[in-house]
Amino acid sequence: MHRYIVSRILLVIPTLLGAAALVFVLMRLIPGDICLVRLGSGGTTFSAQALAQCHAEIGIDKPWIVQFGQFIWGLARGDFGVSMWSGKPVVDEIATRFPVSLEVAVIATIIAISIAIPLGTISALKQNTWIDLVVRTFSIAGIATPAFWLGIMSILLVLDLTQAISGHPWMPSIDYVPLWKDPIRNLSIVMLPAITVGYRYAAVSMRMTRSAMLEVLREDYIRTARAKGLVEKIIINRHALKNALLPVVTVIGLEFAFLIGGLVVTEQVFNLNGIGRLMVLSVQNQDYTLTQALVMLVVTIAVLCNLVVDLIYAWLDPRISLR
């Protein structure tokens, strides 16, 4: 087990280097110049000397190979540099927004798992019944519904309910408060977007759970367990569900990694200053330093999620070799 974990961790290094090289090159292939945007904001004029000075300040006047070397050396030291647009340390820019995206992703994952696995299992056990039809309709609706529309409808629903109950429409404040400072206010801000995201998340996982359970229930060892007279609950929980969860765990891991940096629409609808929204702004402003740091953050989380999924595989199914 230890050797396997070490080997997988070592494989993270070339993956991160490849991602760093790719985002470094792609960002510099985008047309435009951040100094032109900074100096020309507001319609002001500037000289060629001011433009060259701006290039020298942010370091983009150096050859690409030198810039890439500085970028990799900074990653190795945990120094992501300074934002080319705001002039603030990139670590500070990310630190103020990462807790928002992380909390929404964690709560959405908990909601999705709590809904998807039980309903997906019940749908498979009650195949082609009205229960199965209701669950499948619920899951298909979650996949087909656009995130922005679902978010807007949930906001309107909260406004209508509070209007009907108290006579005054209510919505939580838009300024983020950490969970440990004010739990009630924090949950009032992140719970609605987490439920919105978790519904679609649950719909995908639910369909995967149902399909995997149907496949496992047709295996010979399930029929053998039933022929031996084992209790149906033991057959489902110990033999069928654990093996059926392998593809479900993969989907959950991939979706969680996506939620960290892919909630651009949801964050825009609910006015959350998360990682996804920050990434869009950094690309629009051609802030190479900030964009590279954000991409590397998302890639690192995705790689770690894959590592955790591989370890869970071996725990769910001992037949899987870790060598």
Image (tube, rainbow, N blue to C red):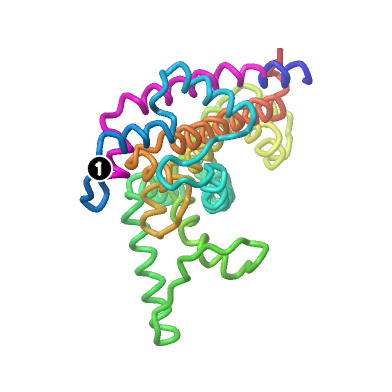
Magenta-drawn stretch contains 18: yes
Front residue of 175/257: it is 175
Front residue of 292/319: it is 292
Is residue 129 among the parts visible in the rendering?
no
Whether 141 is drawn above or below 257: the answer is: below
44 left or right of 19? left
Which residue is at 26% across, 29% downward? Answer: 31
How many numbered marks appear? 1
Front residue of 207/111: it is 111
Residues drawn in magenta: 10-39
Which residue is at 36% across, 24% downward? Answer: 26
Front residue of 33/147: it is 33
Q: Residue furthest right?
A: 2
Give amino acid for label 1: Phe
58 left or right of 240? left
The quadrant holding residue 46 is top left
Q: Residue furthest bottom?
A: 167
Which residue is at 70% across, 18% downward? Answer: 319
Whether 289 is drawn above or below 199: the answer is: above
Q: Quadrant of the N terminus?
A: top right
Q: Main secondary structure of the magenta part?
A: helix
Whether 228 is drawn above or below 319: the answer is: below
Where residue 4 appears, x then y in whole percent? 72, 17
Question: Where does label 1 land, which residue?
Answer: 46
Which residue is at 41% across, 76% downward? Answer: 161
Q: Residue furthest top?
A: 323
Is residue 176 among the parts visible in the rendering?
yes
Magenta-drawn stretch contains 155: no
Where residue 214 appears, x then y in whole percent? 52, 32
Question: What kind of element bears circle 1?
Answer: loop
